[in-house]
Image (cartoon, rainbow, N blue to C red):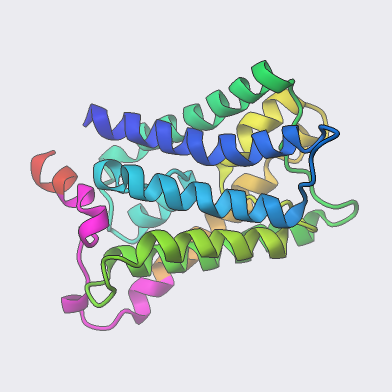
Amino acid sequence: MRQRYVAEFIGTFGIVFAPVALSATGTLPSSDSGLMASAWVSGLSVLAMIYALGHISAAHFNPAVTLGFAIACRFPWRYVLPYLAAEFLGGITAAAVVALLLGGGYGAHIPASGLVAAAVGTEAVLTFFLMLVIISVATDKRVAGAVPGLAIGLTVVFDVLIGGPVSGGSMNPARSLGPALFAGGAAIANYWIYVVGPILGALVAARLYEAIRGSEKHAQGAPNDLYQALHDIEVKG
């Protein structure tokens, strides 16, 4: 099991480091980054980590996703806490590395002024879409095995493009925590938005997909080839 926790740590590190580092380097005179760049960097980092580590840990890299799989009975509850610990630690470490290299305070999520409720709702809806795609491509036998990484990565891209102006487009409590710790102030005060919204959206999406999936013959407790690690967890313990 230890290698799976390490994989979750590394994967979460990667998907947090990429957008936070982009935010930091975006302040350099030679930079030409913006929301579009942030969206694509976020999505491509997720895609890369899925293909690099999905066969080891099932590539959650997101506490909301881990909880979504668990509530849908597609991931063992006994592994939830270690996964959450690895994911949060990976995100914090990524933010720490960026702070060490380029200074702290970059990549933190803060809702647009006066739009706190809208930010919570936006994070919930965006994570709903993300979790819906993830649980579909990861646990349904009818989905082609080559699809997951691309489908999930592109979902992250459009989520960030949509949610960026309102909430920052986090969809991931681990993505937001590390930068918030180094930024302090408003980022810490508003961090709850990036816990409540994503978890709510993920749980609703997971339960809804289980309700509309149809016959259980289409489901698999272990996802398809890219996510075979879940099966290994269940069988081997």
Does the magenta-highlighted stretch encompass residue 216?
yes
Residue 165 located left or right of residue 9 = right
Query: In which quadrant will I find the N terminus?
Result: top left
- Relative to residue 116, is residue 59 drawn left or right? left
Write the residue at 66% across / 36% down: 20
Q: Is residue 199 above or below residue 105?
A: below
- Quarter of the figure that contains the C terminus: top left
Please tell me whether residue 108 belongs to the stretch shown in magenta: no
Residue located at (33% from left, 29% from top): 6
Badge count: 0
- Tell me which segment is drawn in magenta: 208-231
Image x and y of residue 41, in percent: 60, 49
- Rendered position, 173 above or below 166: above
Residue 60 visible to the viewer:
no
Q: Where is residue 47 in the image (x, y as percent from the top left)?
A: 45, 53
Residue 144 higher or lower than 75, as above or below: below
- The residue at the far left in this view is 236
Of 42 and 176, which appears nearest the observer?
42
Q: Can residue 212 be seen in this view?
A: yes
Report the residue at 22% width, 71% height from top: 219
Give the side of residue 230 with respect to residue 100, left or right.
Answer: left
Q: Residue furthest front?
A: 30
Residue 198 drawn at (x, y percent) = 57, 54
- Residue 156: x and y, percent? 56, 59
Q: Which of 30 and 125 is in front in this view?
A: 30
Give the residue at the far right of this rendering: 113
